[in-house]
Amino acid sequence: MADQVEKVIIIGSGPAGWTAAIYAARANLTPLVIEGAVTEKNRQMGTTPLGQLALTTEVENFPGFPSGDTRQYLKTSLPEELQPYWVSANKPQPTHGINGPELMELMRQQAKNFGTRVITDDVVKVDFKKKPFEMVTLGGQTLQALTVIIATGARANYLGLPSEDKFKNRGVSACAVCDGALPRFRNKPLVVIGGGDSAIEEASYLSKFATEVAMVVRRDVFRASKIMQDRAKSNPKIKVRWNSAVEEVLGNDKDGVTAVRIKDTKAGKTEDYVASGMFCAIGHTPNTHFLDGQLELNEKGYVKWTTPARTFTSIDGDFASGDVADDYYRQAITAAGTGCMAALDAERYLGHHGLI
């Protein structure tokens, strides 16, 4: 049994989780964040602590971080052991303003500054059928809480190629809105994998920056809606490669991705298509496996928000924030926004029930 009952436990440590922690801590709810375990399995799945931003490089679209050298700010904001090596070393800063790992460490530190406690472990089992809610970690710890905020995010689906993994964040991406405007992709040919609505949205967005966007589609038809198909076909920069599949991502340590090897599955021929980037648009998988069906999910497998403009789930006292519930926007800033909402919803739930 748990030694104490927490007012709020936050499961997850991306922008949604840390924002929820900041708001909950400032409301004197003494939140506990279970940030995830540092394991090889989590590394391979892309579910290590600090969320998807910890796996990215430049972050240009999070408000408050314009171009500039952030060394002095990081020196005064983060403990020395969390500062990136280029802060103290005589190395060029690898970002236009802030990068993903830096931003996430700053969020984590901000939450801790207000008294947030952190457990570096995975939740492997939950019991939301009784109150207080109960959670069991990979390390065998049992925790109880009056409210829970699920902020475990969603992981992008990739092809699973070793060369793809090698060039992640060096030309391989799963988010055009996040990365498409970066210098490495501007005025260069790009590749998008997929044939659904999301793939066409990605290709259309990238066409604003690329010289050409090659869409690699496994079949000879799109899976996308008619209006999205028309958008792709009418865009002169989008060239569709039907009946095709990616065999390998090519590149080098200096330039990152330089080409994508595409196979025509009907003719059996391969072509090394010169490109500076490859964007996977073959879906996302929400990190809900540990819930074991105890919360209602939508048709795509994301936690269902049951009340408009609220972060309520199907169980009273459980709330969800970020990409684990948002299958539409999937941006760091929207995740942070719903993290704030979830913390306020939890606080008001506790107040309404006389628990604080």
Image: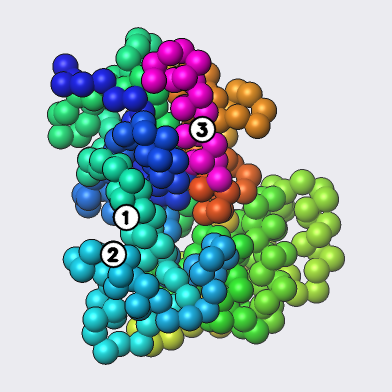
Residue of label 2: 78
Region in magenta: 337-356
Q: How many marks?
A: 3
Residue appearing at x 42%, y 81% in the figure: 69
Q: As displayed, is residue 333 above or below residue 134?
A: below
Residue of label 1: 109
| 235 part of magenta stretch | no
Q: Are marks 2 and 3 in contact (CB under 8 Å)?
A: no
Looking at numbered disc 2 in the image, what kind of residue is underneath it?
Leu
Looking at numbered disc 3 in the image, what kind of residue is underneath it?
Leu
Q: Are marks 2 and 1 in contact (CB under 8 Å)?
A: yes
Is disc 3 placed on a helix, strand or loop? helix
Residue of label 3: 344
Along the line of sight, the residue nearer the viewer: 121 or 186: 121
| 339 part of magenta stretch | yes
**Residue 72 in view:** yes
Along the line of sight, the residue nearer the viewer: 205 or 323: 323
Residue 44 locus on image (x, y percent): 30, 53
